[in-house]
Image (cartoon, rainbow, N blue to C red):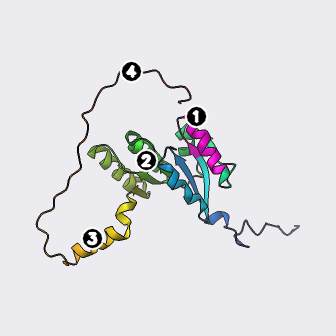
Amino acid sequence: MLAAPQIVRSQVLGRNGGVGANSRINLAFIGHGKQMTGHVSVVETPGVQPLYVYDVKANALAAASADMAKRGFPDVRATPDYEDVINDPAVNGVFIVTPDHWHAAIAIAVMRAGKAVYVEKPMTLTIAESKAMVEAERRYGRILQVGSQQRSEHAFRKAAEMVRSGWIGEIREVYTRLGDFPAPTLEPEQPVPDGFN
């Protein structure tokens, strides 16, 4: 039997300031409108490796790919099919920042594929969709986080602490208002726009 030393670069092991392969979180970003612009900065966190950007609009997908290259990740895969993300076992977590009506369907598919989910608010459009997402999170043992950063901000936490500690007295009634919403309208059928998958 012949034995030979194996040489592995120190960066692979996480030495010399690098992050080892087993310490990386591989992420995918689904939907690249204005809301995603704040979320992609997570790739600047040590240990985060972006693998995919996805959008159905060719111009948004090209912009997302260029943005990743500018941030130092020129090899991030750009795809117009979110199934590519779901079917890749290397992806650990997915940011879902699509139009609201796609949140539930994509999030459930992502969790079924064994990946963690960050989804923008509103989590869903209906109570039934919400229940289905929570059930998927439980069934597949995945992490599901909804983007409600404002509620984690210092002033909101302080207000909650004041209420819970009784500092403002006993709460007997709470009033809230969501505002006025326009009546739904049914738009006429239109052709699929150029550059849209």
Please say if the residues under marks 3 and 4 sit with CB atoms less than 8 Å apart: no
Q: Quadrant of the N terminus?
A: bottom right
Q: Tell me the amino acid under the disc marked 1.
A: Ala
Q: CA distance from mark 4 to mark 2?
A: 28 Å
Give the image location of residue 102, x and y in percent. 41, 40
- Is disc 1 placed on a helix, strand or loop? helix
- Mark earlier in primary sequence (1, 4): 1
- Mark earlier in primary sequence (2, 3): 2
Q: CA distance from mark 1 to mark 4?
A: 21 Å
Count of marks overlaid on the render: 4
Residue 153 falls in which quadrant of the image? bottom left
Residue range of the region highlighted in magenta in the rendering: 53-69
Determine whether, in the image, residue 92 is placed left or right of residue 188. Answer: right
Please say if the residues under marks 1 and 2 sit with CB atoms less than 8 Å apart: no
How crowded is the residue under tag 4: few (<14 C-alpha within 10 Å), some, or many (20+)?
A: few
Q: Tell me the amino acid under the disc marked 2.
A: Ala
Which disc is residue 58 wearing? 1
Q: CA distance from mark 1 to mark 3?
A: 43 Å
Residue that appears at 42% across and 46% down: 108
Residue matched to label 4: 189
> Closer to us: mark 1 or mark 2?
1
Residue matched to label 3: 160
Residue 182 falls in which quadrant of the image? top left
Which disc is residue 107 wearing? 2
- Is disc 2 placed on a helix, strand or loop? helix
Q: Tell me the amino acid under the disc marked 4.
A: Glu
Give the image location of residue 19, x and y in percent. 66, 67
Please say if the residues under marks 4 and 2 sit with CB atoms less than 8 Å apart: no
